Amino acid sequence: MTSRSLGRTAGLLYLAIIASGIFAELAVRGRLIDVGNAESTARNILAHQSFYGMGIVADLLMVACDLALSAILYTLFASYSRVGALAMTLLRLTPVGMLAVKSLFAAAVVPILSGRIPLDAFSLAQREDIALLMLRLHDQLYSLAMVFFGLNLLALGLLIIRSGLVPRMIGLFLIIGGLCDLVVRVPPLIDRTLAASIPAVVGFGPLAAELALAGWLLVVGWRRFESNTDITPPVSRG
């Protein structure tokens, strides 16, 4: 497979990841979950179990696409710097693993509420509270994963700027997106009241940056000026 084809495949994977994440978080959990009301959340999920399950499947699809994307980006950037590509890849695989684990919390909710997990010692209200706790742990792990994701964007942006394999302006966008992610995710870990002081628009920084990269990859694929048609064995420069 040529590097240009790999680049376009990476662009498609980016779009699949973004679409899956938006569907799972906003279309599914955003409609069904009321974090302040365990009873309402339980009622919504039990009434729409298939729809809720589609959100979990979308999460797993996102994880699978992210694994493939990590491998492709490493292959493309390793020709410039094995060390830089490895650091960028590890910073992406770390949150991907955390996202896979968080799906376990989401998947436990329906069995808890439906009684498939025997919790006879707990009342219905207590089982609803346990299910909501699973969802809160799910969200907390997601927030922690996004901290590493922000670091990944910083590493990827720096790698792009240094290598010139992608327009440096996109690398700058990724750095800004990574900083936005850290601004949104880190302060609430210290004091949750700080979250209210962060403008909502800051949270769109990572999405905008990755959409820019995905768009360039889909249109160009990879460097226009490359002379080779196939991926050659990478030569490390650091």
Image (tube, rainbow, N blue to C red):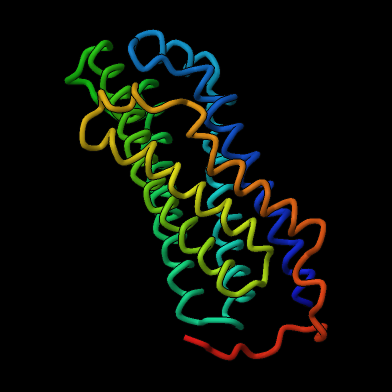
Tell me what residue is drawn at x 67 percent, y 72 percent.
165
Residue 186 placement: quadrant = top left
Q: Residue sitting at 41 percent across and 34 percent down?
A: 106
* Residue plotted at (31% across, 16% down): 128
In the rendered structure, the answer to whether residue 180 lies left or right of residue 75 reads left
Q: Quadrant of residue 35?
A: top left
**Where residue 216 sits in the image (x, y, percent)?**
74, 56
> Where is residue 135 drawn, in percent x and y?
36, 28
Establish if 14 lies above or below 51.
below
Total of numbered circles in the picture? 0
Near-viewer residue (87 or 117): 87
Residue 101 in picture, x, y percent from top left: 38, 48
Q: Is residue 166 above or below residue 204?
A: below
Query: In percent of the image, x 46 and y 58: which residue is there?
Result: 154
Quadrant where the N terminus is found in the figure: bottom right
Q: Horizontally, is 4 left or right of 155 in the view? A: right
Viewer-proximal residue among 59 and 207? 207
The answer to which of 29 and 9 lies nearer the viewer is 9
